[in-house]
Image (tube, helix red, strand yellow):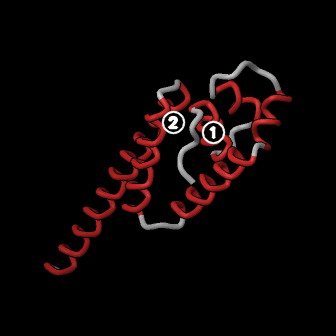
Amino acid sequence: MPTLQNPQHEAFAQARSRSVSLEDAFENAGFSPDRSHACRLAKRDDVSARIAELRAAREKVEESEPQAIIDALIRMARDSEVLKTPAGLKEARLNLLEADRLRTALTAYRNKERFQIHNEATA
């Protein structure tokens, strides 16, 4: 399913896919606080399908290889940037920061492995 046409609905779906509370996701998407409207939005067929799709993508990412996770985070950041809402930009920033953190950790891990292999070969 493609990104939802309404940027606020997409921001809401992305927040809900990360297990943000119903009310917080609704407010972060730019809506005025109102629990009943948040419930109604979450029950819309297109929004609930998008939430399910995003959750499935996150689960798949969590089971993937490190580089695939980094690539997926960058793709999610690009999708979030398109929204041009505060919540979308915040999501993009968080995804890019996480991608950078993982890339740094992966590089450090690989360097450590290379160092160990080199030391074993010269010992």
55 left or right, relative to 82: right
Which quarter shows the C terminus?
Answer: bottom left
Label placed on residue 15: 1
Whether 50 is drawn above or below 114: the answer is above
Foreground: 62 or 81?
81
Residue 113, position in %: x, y? 29, 69
Q: Identify the residue position indicated by label 2 in the image.
A: 91
Image point (81%, 23%), residue name: 34
Most extreme residue toward the right, as rendered? 36
For marks 1 and 2 on the same chain, the one whose residue lies earlier in the sequence: 1
Image point (63%, 54%), residue name: 55
Residue 93, position in %: x, y? 44, 34
Proximity of marks 1 and 2: CB atoms separated by less than 8 Å:
yes
Residue 44, position in %: x, y? 76, 43
Foreground: 112 or 46?
46
SS under mark 1: helix
Q: How far apart are the two marked residues, 1 and 2, measured between alpha carbons?
A: 8 Å
* Amino acid type, label 1: Ala
Foreground: 43 or 98?
43
Image point (47%, 27%), residue name: 84
* Amino acid type, label 2: Glu
Residue 57, position in %: x, y? 56, 58
